[in-house]
Image (cartoon, helix red, strand yellow):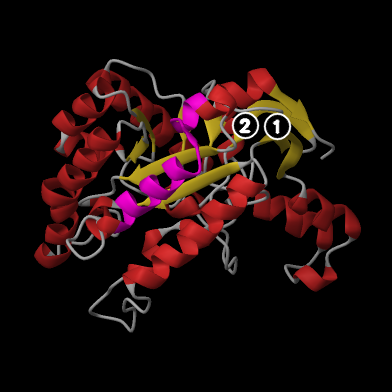
């Protein structure tokens, strides 16, 4: 249940705590003790920056694909055959084109998969693991965590991990929340699950340890960023004003500018793509272009889990 009047989907228990302490729901009336508590519930701890990448590479590349497929409609309780078919396109065509490019380039990637998508397309997850890729948690049905009671969020995350393990034979090591919607309980649950990392937050360009109420968790964040997400540029909803507004060649320029500076800073270039979006004929070349340019710059490619393992073992900790 969401606390009435909360525009951000605050869990009921947390909202009750804040109202009790402040006597008001207006944030401009919060005392310092409350806004500090909210701001530091989940925060960035020490950065984890390696002095060198494997093979003396100047930087690392973390490619990821959110295989939402039909759950883009199912999570809304929707039954639109048209919207379901858009998700099915990602499973039928998008994934095929993506895996062909990855195979030809011989680079690994991470696939974040809602459990329902995995159950609808189990062969894709099995093949991904066989080809050296990683499959990570992405919710049960691509649900928004901040809309859930805490017990429901925990149950769905646990069940999702169980499904992925049963299908792939490997326990997931990482999490990406659906739509990067991270509740005030998500990190606690991820810690309980023993996850190595999360990839949903945006406090840095490079890896850092996540803090819960100011205390280290051991969970590493491999940060994302909306500017490195294809959905921002190519989203489409025929029932609203949402339309693709950026030409593919302009999107490539943005991605390559991010890639170039990541190389110069000897950091991480992380990219988030969606099979039903990037997988169409006029956009799939973007993936190949990014990989080709990264190789020209001498990048080391790793799954999210491989990169996080490396920075944990070889990274020096910067001041948080």
Left or right: 5 in relation to 215: left
The image's mark for residue 220 is: 2
Left or right: 146 in relation to 16: left
User: How many marks on residues?
Assistant: 2
- Nearer the camera: disc 1 or disc 2: 1
Instruction: Say which of 280 and 212 sits in front.
Output: 280
- x, y percentage for residue 91? 16, 46
Task: Tell me what residue is drawn at x 15 percent, y 36 percent.
Answer: 121
Label 1 with label 2: CB-CB less than 8 Å = yes
For the stretch drawn in magenta, the main secondary structure is helix
Quadrant in the picture for residue 320: top right
| SS label for mark 2 | strand
Left or right: 89 in relation to 173: left
Q: Can residue 191 be seen in this view?
A: yes
Residue stretch in magenta: 286-306
Would you place residue 280 above or below residue 270 in this image? below
- x, y percentage for residue 215? 78, 31
- x, y percentage for residue 105? 29, 36
Instruction: Say which of 202 and 282 sits in front.
Output: 282
| Between discs 1 and 2, the one toward the N terminus | 1
Q: Can residue 177 be seen in this view?
A: no
Residue at far right of view: 32
Q: Mark 1 points at which residue?
A: 48
């Amino acid at each position: 249940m969401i606390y009435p009047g909360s525009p951000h989907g605050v869990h009921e228990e947390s909202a009750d705590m804040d109202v009790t302490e402040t006597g008001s729901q207006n944030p401009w009336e919060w005392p310092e003790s409350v806004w500090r508590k909210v701001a530091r519930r989940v925060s960035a701890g020490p950065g984890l920056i390696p002095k060198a990448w494997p093979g003396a590479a100047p930087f690392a590349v973390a490619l990821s694909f959110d295989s939402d497929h039909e759950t883009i409609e199912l999570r809304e309780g929707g039954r639109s055959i048209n919207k379901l078919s858009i998700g099915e396109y990602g499973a039928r065509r998008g994934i095929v084109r993506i895996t062909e490019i990855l195979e030809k380039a011989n680079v690994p990637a991470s696939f974040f998969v809602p459990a329902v998508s995995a159950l609808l397309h189990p062969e894709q997850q099995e093949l991904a693991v066989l080809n050296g890729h990683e499959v990570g948690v992405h919710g049960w049905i691509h649900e928004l965590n901040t809309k859930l009671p805490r017990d429901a969020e925990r149950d769905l995350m646990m069940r999702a991990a169980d499904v992925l393990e049963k299908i792939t034979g490997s326990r997931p090591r990482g999490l990406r929340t659906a739509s990067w919607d991270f509740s005030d309980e998500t990190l606690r649950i991820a810690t309980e699950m023993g996850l190595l990392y999360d990839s949903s937050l945006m406090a840095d360009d490079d890896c850092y340890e996540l803090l819960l109420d100011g205390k280290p968790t051991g969970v590493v964040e491999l940060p994302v960023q909306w500017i490195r997400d294809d959905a921002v540029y190519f989203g489409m909803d025929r029932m609203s004003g949402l339309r693709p507004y950026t030409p593919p060649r302009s999107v490539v320029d943005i991605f390559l500018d991010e890639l170039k500076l990541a190389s110069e800073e000897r950091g991480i270039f992380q990219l988030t793509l969606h099979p039903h979006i990037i997988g169409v004929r006029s956009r799939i070349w973007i993936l190949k272009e990014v990989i080709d340019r990264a190789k020209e710059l001498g990048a080391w490619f790793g799954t999210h889990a491989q990169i996080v393992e490396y920075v944990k073992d070889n990274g020096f900790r910067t001041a948080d």
